[in-house]
Amino acid sequence: MIDTTSLKTAQAAPDFSDVEATSLLTLYGRSIESQSQDPILVDENAEKITRQIDEVIAGSSEPLLRMLHQRRIDPRLVVHVALRAQKYDEYARDFIARFPAGAVVNLGCGMDTRFQRIDDGQVIFFDLDLPEVIRFKQSFLQETDRYRMLAGSMFEQGWLDQVDAAGRNPLIFLVEGVFMYLPEEDVKRLVLSLQSRFPGSELVCEVVNQRWTRGIWKTLASRKMQRQLKLGKGTEYNFGISSADEMESWNKAIQYIERWSYFETRHPKLGWMRAFSGLSMMNDVQYTVYYRLN
């Protein structure tokens, strides 16, 4: 799936916004974990892509790109990224096993390589992100008759029409590490649109506790991302929920199924952080919710 001529046409370095830059961070996190001993997640495509990106970001003065090139990513974040990606892969595999005629839609996909990881030879898969992200991604990965990359905002109508035209039903929408950076009214409008347009589908999305989107808590989270992750000032939490089933109040057709926190895995690589698995205060900071859109 890797285009060996990718960097001949790719930009000298990705010109991403602060939020879009998080996709490079998670890409490198998966690559690092994939090459570790007893990896949580094997992602050979992430390994290949990061080696190619290394060639064009070597010597960059940008703090984030320099950190990525030197592989100076907090090991705790690497484990978090890998456990989350593994879980979302499981959600996708379970869905296509239950609904072979359905399809997977990866919203705000960034540099994710989920299709390549879960491809069973039959799955129909859509990646959606902003045009600059998709252009960069197309430098490394090729579309097929079952894998399409859609360029545009998730709040625009065009991609909905393209997915609808494929005639697949039902759909599972995966929104990994995206919603928390978006305005609340936009997230709510999108979820209601998905429920109305694709009834019978499912939604898996990562969220943060509402407290991290306000006041001093929001400031602390933003400063941590800037200092530890070298992300820009535009990276801040804007949307959160107060309880895992909160979206049910948006429309009676939205049904809460379950929630998941990576602390719950008690994976050995979590080390001392496994002690947090029983603490609701920690599990409620950032977690994944699973809904059915009836």
Image (cartoon, rainbow, N blue to C red):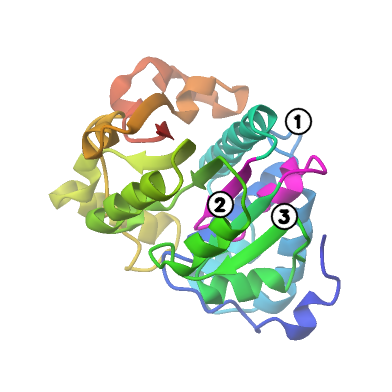
Q: Residue at x 31, y 53 (%)?
A: 187
Kind of residue sitting beneath label 1: Asp
Q: Disc 2 versus disc 1: distance between alpha carbons?
A: 27 Å
Q: Nearer the viewer, residue 31 or 227?
A: 31
Say which quarter of the image contains residue 170: top right
Q: Residues within 10 Å of mark 2 (few under 14, many from 20)?
A: many
Q: Which mark is residue 46?
A: 3
Query: What percent of the width, then of the height, locates residue 192?
Result: 32, 48
Q: Quarter of the image holding residue 25?
A: bottom right
Task: Give the mark nearer the N terminus: 3 vs 2.
Answer: 3
Q: Are marks 2 and 1 in contact (CB under 8 Å)?
A: no
Q: Please tell me in which quadrant of the rendered image residue 247 appears.
A: top left
The secondary structure type at the circle numbered 2 is strand
Relative to 15, residue 243 above or below: above
Residue 251 shown left or right of residue 195 in the figure: left
- Of circles 3 and 2, the one toward us is 2
The amino acid on which the numbered mark 3 sits, given as a three-letter code, is: Ala
Picture residue at 23% right of the left edge, 40% below the top: 250
Query: Residue 38: which numbered mark, if any?
Result: 1
**Closer mark to the observer between disc 2 and disc 1:** 2
Which numbered disc, 1 or 3, marks the residue that appears first in the sequence?
1
Disc 1/disc 3 C-alpha distance (Å): 17 Å
Q: Is residue 95 magenta?
A: no
Percent across and percent down for residue 88 are 57, 37
Q: Which mark is residue 232?
A: none
Residue 106: assigned label: 2
Q: Which residues are magenta?
A: 102-123
